Image: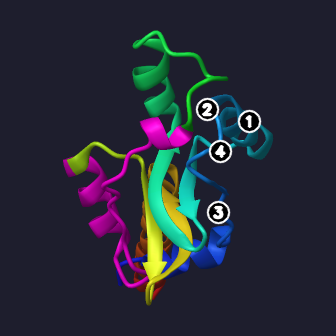
Amino acid sequence: MAATVQQILHNKGTTTHSVPPEITVLEALRLMAECNVSAVLVTEGARLVGIFTERDYARKVILKGLTSKDTKVGELMTQNILTVSPNHTVEDCMAIMTHNHVRHLPVVDKGQLAGIVSIGDAVKAVMEQQKATIEQLSGYISGGMST
């Protein structure tokens, strides 16, 4: 059975880190460093309006000659965000991430932000699933040969 986003969130938790669009890039980077994350969601109240990632910083601040302390996250955030639901499979997430060249997918459940899944979370889930399959097959083979 394929692992789901719900299972990932159950294992890693549903904590998300978010900032308002008017915060400076420098403040967002400080939060990302403090929380050891590579992306923050951008929200206006409870509404998800964007995502700001280390990749956004590298490509939209440094390369354009902007300064982190004078530029607002809302100016640089990715606005057309792809999201998934808790019922999506890990394979769905990996396909979406690969096809769209993104590393983070916010999880939305019934219109509410429910968490975030990163490419690392998806890879970890696939590895755990493969390990369980190998253990089952090894047990089957060992059990079948001991008769």
Q: How crowded is mark 2: few (under 14 residues within 10 Å), some or many (20 or more)?
A: many
In this rendered view, identify the residue nearer to me: 14 or 31. 31
Q: Which percent across, then down, holds residue 8?
A: 54, 72
First to last magenta residue range: 73-99
Q: How crowded is mark 3: few (under 14 residues within 10 Å), some or many (20 or more)?
A: some
Q: Which amino acid does label 1 sit on?
A: Ala
Q: Distance between the residues labelled 2 and 4?
A: 15 Å
Q: How far apart are marks 4 and 1 (CA)?
A: 7 Å
In this rendered view, identify the residue nearer to me: 92 or 101. 101
Label 3 SS: loop
Callout 1–callout 2 Cβ contact below 8 Å: no
> Compared to 94, does 12 lie above or below?
below
> Compared to 34, does 105 lie above or below?
below
The residue carrying mark 4 is 37
Q: Which percent across, then down, holds residue 65?
A: 46, 9
Q: What residue type is labelled 2?
A: Val
Figure quadrant of residue 67: top right
> Which residue does the image show at 51% across and 71% down from the upper left?
47
Label 1 SS: helix
Q: Nearer the viewer, mark 3 or mark 2?
A: 2
Residue 25's disc is 2
Disc on the earlier residue, 1 or 3: 3
Q: Which of marks 1 and 2 is in front?
A: 2
